[in-house]
Image: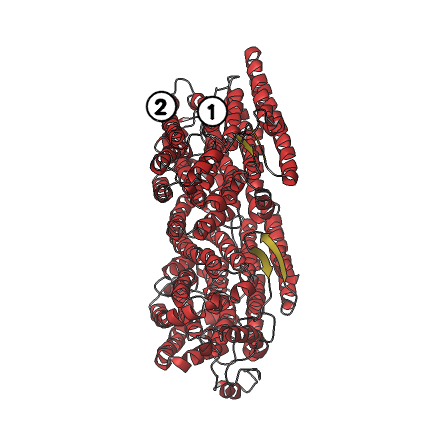
Amino acid sequence: MIALFVLVIPVVFAVVTGLGGARRSAALAFGLFSTLATFVLTLFLYGSSGISVPWIPGFGVTFTLEPTGAGSVLTLVAALVMIPTVVMAARRVERSPGAFVALMLLMQAGLSGIFLAHDLVLFYVSWEFALIPSMLLLGAFGREKRRAAVLKYLVYAIGGSFLMLISILAIKPLSGAASYRFTDLMSVTPHLAAATQVWLFVGLAIGMAVKLPLWPLHSWLIDFNEQNHPSGAADVMGTLYKVGGFGFFAWAIPLLPVGAERVGPVLLVLSVVTALYGAIAAAAQTDIKRLLAYASLSHMGIVGVGIFGLHLAGLNGAIFLLAAQMLSTGGLFLVSGMLYQRRHSFDLDRFGGLAKSAPALAALSLFVLFTFIGVPGLANFPGEFLSLLGAYQHHPWLAAAATLSVVAAGVYGVNFYQRLYQGQEHEATHEIGTLEAFALIPLIAGILWLGIFPSPQLQRIQVQSRLIAATTTSASAGALLAAPLPDTTTLAGAKGGPLAPPSLPGEGPVAPDAPLGGGQ
Amino acid sequence: MSFPPALDIHWANLTPELALLITAAITTLFALFQRNSRSSAWLGLIGAAVAAALNANLFVQHRVSGASSSFGLRFIADTPGLALNFVILLGTALAILVSYDYLKRSDLDHPEYYPLILYSATGAMIMVAAGDLVTLLLGLEIMSLPVYVLAAWRQGARQSEEAGMKYFLLGAFGSAILIYGAALTYGATGSFVYADIIAALQASGFAAPLLATLGGALVLSGLAFKAAIAPFHQWAPDVYTGAPTSVTTFMSVVVKTAAFAALIRIASTIYPGMEPWLMTTLAVLVGLTLVVGNLAALLQTGVKRMLAYSAVAHAGYLGLAVLAGASGVRAVAWYLAAYTFMNVGAFAVLMLVSDANDHGDELERFAGLGRRRPGLAFAMTLFMLSLGGIPPLAGFTGKILVFQAAIASGYTVLAVIGILTSVVALVYYFRVVTYMYFREPESELPAYHSPAAQVAIWAAALGTVLLGVFPGWWYGLVSSGQQLLARI
């Protein structure tokens, strides 16, 4: 039932804020209350009971929410990131902050729906439901060239998701499943003929690759971030909305393992290209938001590498990295908004030496940036490491190539910091304000929490990925997923903590230990 | 098959149509004595409500005792038909509300307006119930003749008169084709009654399959004309644009509902017994409609004309479910309800935004509407997104149902075409939203207030949202009983 409230609360407050509280103070109060309440509920999400009621009876569509491992972790972290973002938006958006906050809350409901849906049609509905507010945020509150950016975003997103819809509509009649519930689909779809699986998978993959995003379907992302409201709040929402990786993890790969096995290598190569291309392009940018957009694209490439390596460690790492980058990329976008407030520009050349007059802002930025480039002990590191490790098991050369992007991240990250905070100071600026500090502190707390104690969340993710691996062993491709993972103990040793849960599958497939299974 | 005894009239089956017809007659009398049409409007609403209540009564009865028919299967009251009667009555009531203030503002307030609307709706309900080609033709004519007049309602305006004339000439042509098709079918099978035609087609040693199929094809052409399926859609953009917006509202939902009700009844019962090339032809036409409607809508700068082409495109989506035959009946009935809500809403908003003479429907008119009239803009956003098929609004569920019906009956390629063209559709629907929220107007433009139309708009918005979020109850209703002809 908690899952239902996690969806309903933001919608209710979005309606209240949108209809009644156009005033700034009301928007702040409603937004803060809604996000706090949602966050507290998401703390108890994992292990709570799901909900399943018929939605379009006779058609096999149900309203099924299930707080699975990965879904509950992502919902939790997204709910945490929402708190400071709503506050920043309510304070920094000049015109109609109430509408802005209402759209953010609607989007949060859609995102939680994506993460918690356990019915394929409900998943798709949430996927599209989140799109409209994000488009309106860009179109109504964005910068000068927002209309072109919206059109580009619309065509990519809708084109991709409608192709996904074809596969979704076809998968039930083709497989003869009883309903669109995950468990019902899962008991039949992995046995579909290989050719059918491939084309169904391709349909799903195009929609999800747009949202991952993967090169060459990424180009909307750069304009999206560049043209969004300079407070950075809408960019944070966009970061939370990078749900393509989760879609592959929770739906496409488990439902169509043979398709994943056939198409996966292509997507893996694209992911490596994305990682490298994003890193190289980021190094060449002079606009803060474009730089961050390319840098986060590069990270999404790593997520793709983790997922399409089709190995348990990589799958765990990819989802963990998705959660971690919500905090780090989100944090950097909020910092970009703070910088814009000081200079009214995103041009890197207009900055420099800010550390002299704003040392605390510089320190906090550096901390988030370190997370972003994958310094061990902080949130991104376990995710990046496991993603690359997983891919290395079957595709060592591709994994090695992708690792270069992590090296590049260090270069552009440090360069970014230097150009902002070091060197000659053109003009003095003011130190970090209370609002700004409040915005960054929850994110930093989250970064430390995920970075120092990754195990609990990794274990939750692992519960789901193990089940996926176990159920898919019924198909030929399952063996790949359930392959042994030799190196985690080394990682745990290096980190000085029990990173890898002891229940990691040491050798071969693991028996399903929850009702989710049922492949055979 | 022998005819049932001659006197199986079953008056109860006819009560919804009779209620509407009597209301129409009374309002016609009103028109003799009154210059103002407002009392007719109220009476029309009451008549529609009474008809809906009688229809509901039938609906409940038939859920218990099974479907029923009058005049020896010539007039059929089964669950899908009764459900579609609700849709027609809903469309009529909303159209009356939309017209209420508009007629006065546009100086079109002649007392004959509402009687014509009610006669037309009666004809539409007869078409829904038709179980025989002659009844079908009668319903079609009763429905069409008032609409020909209504399309030319704006006297002295060339566009409107052209619309009426064009609709009449092409409509007469369409009817003629339908009659010719009915004649050929009669020649091949010896009957006008669907049930007898089916029996003749299924009888072993049936002598004239080609003749019967030709007849079926001509009937299809006649109905495709009313339903605006390409290439029989050519009249639609001009007539929709030229007719007064309130008439367009009525036409785009009620006429379409009746046409598709008749088409799905024939396609699900008679066509399967005919030669397979007939359904293949229909499939090609549906694909063509999807492409032509959506691409043409993309090129329009006037919102009214864009909505006209969008109505053509939606005929394509409905056509996908018609192809599915018997399994598509529920999808058609469901989709038409959703379509009625969102299309009436869109036209009603357009009516308030454009000038009294229906000019000024350019996209620029919508610039800044989000700030000037937030409620109106919000409702229009809902209608546009729903027409574009964005969840969780009604249009999305409707699309799911028709695509699923098409895929389940093997028309996967058409479903793919439908989904790809939906991407195009979303571009032109979203363009309206773009103007409302993302652009500032060059000059301050008025948007009119009309309490009655606003009631219609909010009812439509509520319907669009509720049908989308809770699709189950309406789906349950349309699929609760059996179809009468399916058992024969």
Which residue position is annotated with label 2? Answer: B169
Tell me: residue B255, above or below residue A368. above
Q: Residue B275, image x and y in percent?
A: 36, 42
Front-most of A448 and B86? B86
- Among the two numbered marks 2 and 1 on one chain, the one whose residue lies closer to the N terminus: 1
Q: How many marks?
A: 2
Front-most of A500 and B312? B312
Circle number at residue A500:
none
Q: Nearer the viewer, mark 2 or mark 1?
A: 1
The residue tagged with tag 2: helix, strand or loop? helix
Chain ID of residue with mark 1 = B
A372 left or right, relative to A518:
left
Are labels 2 and 1 on one chain?
Answer: yes
The residue tagged with tag 1: helix, strand or loop? helix
Q: Residue A427, image x and y in percent?
A: 43, 64
Coloring basis for residues: secondary structure
Q: Residue B182, image x and y in percent?
A: 40, 29
Amino acid type for the residue under numbered disc 2: Leu
Front-most of A443 and B80? B80
A447 left or right, relative to B310:
right
Which residue position is annotated with label 1? Answer: B138
